[in-house]
Amino acid sequence: MQTVNGIDALRAAIGQDLGTSEWYPLEQARVDAFADATEDHQWIHVDRERAQDGPFGTTVAHGYLLLALVPHLCWQVFETTGIAMEINYGLDRVRFPAPARIPCDIRARVRLESVEPSGAAFLLKLQVVVEGRDEGKPLCVAETLGYLVPEEPN
């Protein structure tokens, strides 16, 4: 993990890859728990027997589960000092080019797209590419948005 020291250092890193997270094992139990939490029990996610004969040959993770894991994966890549608070603002473009076949290992590659002033905060845009081990295409590509509130000067 790398540490970025404040807003000025972030702005200097615009356009750069910040790094790649560790591999994260995505198992059926996590998919089932996500299905329970979201009430999304579509058979391609939770019915192992039926999914064997389905289009992917196994169950697949919910796309929104991959998105929900993005903060955890990004926290492994970098941290920023001099920030009092980080607030999730949302997402811009999101795509799921390939299914996350279960079980699989996933990781995120993170690129800093922009850091723009916004009132007393700064709007941070990251491009996050979630990869699956041994997959030819990304599982998820998302532009994440967050507000960074700098610490008050001493």
Image (tube, rainbow, N blue to C red):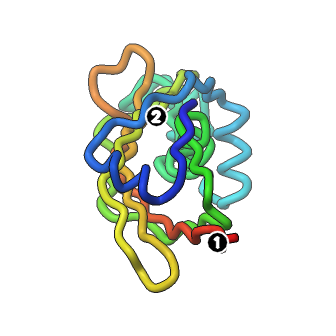
Rate crowding at label 2 as few (under 14), some (14 to 19) or many (20 or more) other CA atoms within 10 Å: many
SS state under label 2 = strand
Q: Is residue 68 visible?
A: yes
User: Relative to the observer, which residue lies in front, 23 or 82?
Assistant: 82
| Residue 134 position in % (x across, y down) | 39, 14
**In terms of sequence position, does the residue under pointer 1 or pointer 2 come before the other?**
2
| Residue 91 position in % (x across, y down) | 41, 64
**Residue annotated with mark 1:** 153
User: Relative to the observer, which residue lies in front, 125 or 137?
Assistant: 125
Q: Are marks 1 and 2 in contact (CB under 8 Å)?
A: no
| Residue 123 position in % (x across, y down) | 42, 69
Figure check: 54 above or below 10: above
SS state under label 1 = loop
Q: Quadrant of the N terminus?
A: top right
Q: Quadrant of the C terminus?
A: bottom right
User: Relative to the observer, which residue lies in front, 31 or 68?
Assistant: 68
Question: Residue 86 sits in which quadrant?
Answer: bottom right
Q: Nearer the viewer, mark 1 or mark 2?
A: 1
Residue sitting at the far front: 154
Residue 70, which numbered label? none
Q: Is residue 42 visible?
A: no
- Determine whether, in the image, residue 75 is placed left or right of residue 58: right
- Determine whether, in the image, residue 5 is placed left or right of residue 139: right
Residue for point 56% across, 22% down: 23
**Residue annotated with mark 2:** 108
Figure check: 10 above or below 57: below
